[in-house]
């Protein structure tokens, strides 16, 4: 009996993907973790690995097609390896849903699950009851390539690990917990987080999850997000000349959704200031050749990121999020800084994790790597999640100022404009200094203008006095 491989949950807020390439053909013998599909989501281009050893019996998708999470992608025939069959088998098992109903047989409605002990999330058609029977195939494990690689390195069979991610997806943390002997706690955690997921089709509105909340799409807005007002009517532009309509898709669509949500949910206020980075630029230039010989590109952005983290520790309200449902401020005691990267597909924000634990040289290397991967569409999805604060730099392009928009559900974003030589007064004398404009947009519900001014001044002080970086280190 053929095993059906469904489009897995590719990350929070991702509901659909466009098939870029099908890397196999019907009749091919494939092995676990072999790339079989390349898809483009609204965040990145992702290679999907083969979940089992077997034979491609039927390919249900083609390049250029847009599919939703849970859609049947490929059917596998033939026999899997013993390791694939062990503990899972090819039989279908019934699971109890949260409402007490059991899973049964309804073609194409199942979601891949990590292990037979995890609760299987249901996919419902509009108008059908939650208790409908669904087929669950327990052979396939939903996990990203990075998670699969970690499991191989630790010698862990993913089918034995319960996933705590959406739809039972196995996360890196689940693999590490299992390796540490915490299997029981992991399974119970996965069951408590599993919830029914509704089927998404072209007529049904989408739901986007951010910060634990859920925003139902406004079908009249066309952007998949409620704006509180119906979409505006446009005039017939065709009366005045030729026009072309192009669908708002992938990254650009996601940007439109995020910007609409950020602007409609967060009362933005922007604090402007300038930093005299004359000494810092001289220090950077002095060591540039030495570091370049080691393959390291030392940029001003890295120094700004380190200064931001120092400021976030002193002013934690800018490293927080507001939970609108509970009326609570969520302070994050970790420092993951997102860096906006311009690509040919739109603006993408990879995240540098645990910045406070890394040196300027380490961050320089990591920033260069993630920026290159982002521009070439090779960034993995794990690198696009978990940010607590964002920095954007238009200095390389130009511009003397900006009003950056907050990356929801974060509380603030710092914009860097082009540094330029300007006259400055030092010790009563007019000199030429290298001045960089800064703009901090922040959530006025969480912080006030005075706090924002102090926060920016803290950053400026570090940038203007490079020795303070050494003192803090």
Image (cartoon, rainbow, N blue to C red):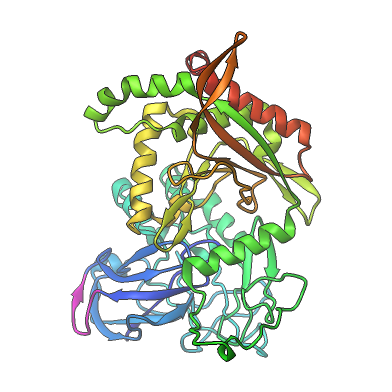
Place of residue 103 in the rendered image (x, y in percent of width and height, measured from the top left): 55, 81
Observer-nearest residue: 386 or 444?
444
Left or right: 289 as drawn, with respect to 310: left
Q: Give residue 365's position: percent from left, percent from top.
A: 34, 35
Residue 91 appears in which quarter of the rendering? bottom left
Residue at 25% across, 81% down = 56
Q: Nearer the viewer, residue 264 or 402?
A: 402
Is 156 placed above or below 72 here? above
Q: Position of residue 105 (x, y in %)?
A: 50, 88
Q: Percent x, y for residue 388?
A: 59, 43
**Left or right of 49 on screen, residue 329:** right
Looking at the image, residue 314 sits to the left or right of residue 72; the answer is: right
Q: Main secondary structure of the magenta part?
A: loop
Residue 9, visible in the rendered structure: no
| Residue drawn at (35%, 23%) of the image | 285
Q: Is residue 286 magenta?
A: no
Q: Is residue 472 above or below residue 44?
A: above
Residue 365 in view (yes/no): yes
First to last magenta residue range: 23-30
**Displayed quadrant of residue 376:** bottom left
Give me the residue at 60% from left, 83% from top.
124
Which residue appears farthest toward the top when viewing the image? Answer: 427
Count of numbered badges drawn on the protein: 0
């Amino acid at each position: 009996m053929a095993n059906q491989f469904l489009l897995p949950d590719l990350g929070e807020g991702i509901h659909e993907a466009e098939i870029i390439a099908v890397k196999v053909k019907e009749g091919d013998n494939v092995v676990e973790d072999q790339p079989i599909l390349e898809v483009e989501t609204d965040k990145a281009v992702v290679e999907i690995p083969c979940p089992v050893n077997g034979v491609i019996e039927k390919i249900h998708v083609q390049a250029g097609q847009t599919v939703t999470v849970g859609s049947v992608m490929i059917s596998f025939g033939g026999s899997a390896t013993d390791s694939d069959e062990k503990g899972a088998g090819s039989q279908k098992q019934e699971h109890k849903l949260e409402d007490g109903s059991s899973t049964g047989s309804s073609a194409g409605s199942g979601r891949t699950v990590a292990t037979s002990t995890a609760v299987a999330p249901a996919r419902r058609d509009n108008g059908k009851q939650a208790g409908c029977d669904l087929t669950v195939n327990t052979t396939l494990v939903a996990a990203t390539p990075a998670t699969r690689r970690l499991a191989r390195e630790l010698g862990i069979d993913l089918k034995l690990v319960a996933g705590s991610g959406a739809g039972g997806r196995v996360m890196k943390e689940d693999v590490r917990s299992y390796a540490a002997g915490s299997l029981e706690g992991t399974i119970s955690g996965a069951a408590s987080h599993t919830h029914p997921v509704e089927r998404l089709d072209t007529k049904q509105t989408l739901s986007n999850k951010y910060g634990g909340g859920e925003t139902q799409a406004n079908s009249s807005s066309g952007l998949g997000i409620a704006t509180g007002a119906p979409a505006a009517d446009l005039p017939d532009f065709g009366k005045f000349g030729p026009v072309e309509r192009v669908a708002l898709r992938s990254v650009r669509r996601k940007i439109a959704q995020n910007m609409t949500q950020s602007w409609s949910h967060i009362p933005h206020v922007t604090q402007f200031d300038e930093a005299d980075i004359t000494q810092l630029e001289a220090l950077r230039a002095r060591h540039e050749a030495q570091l370049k010989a080691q393959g390291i590109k030392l940029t001003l952005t890295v120094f700004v990121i380190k200064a931001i983290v120092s400021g976030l520790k002193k002013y934690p309200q800018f490293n927080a999020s507001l939970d609108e449902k509970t009326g609570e401020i969520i302070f994050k005691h970790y420092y993951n800084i997102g860096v906006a990267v311009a690509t040919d597909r739109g603006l993408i924000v990879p995240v540098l994790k645990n910045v406070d634990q890394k040196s300027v040289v380490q961050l320089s290397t990591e920033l260069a790597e993630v920026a290159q991967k982002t521009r070439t569409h090779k960034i993995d999805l794990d690198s696009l999640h978990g940010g607590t604060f964002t920095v954007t730099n238009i200095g390389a392009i130009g511009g003397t100022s900006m009003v950056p928009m907050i990356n929801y559900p974060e509380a603030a974003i710092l914009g860097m404009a082009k540094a330029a030589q300007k006259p400055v007064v030092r010790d009563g004398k007019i000199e030429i200094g290298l001045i960089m404009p800064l703009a901090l947009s922040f959530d006025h519900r969480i912080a006030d203008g005075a706090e924002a001014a102090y926060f920016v001044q803290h950053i400026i002080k570090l940038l203007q006095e490079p020795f303070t970086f050494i003192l803090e280190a």
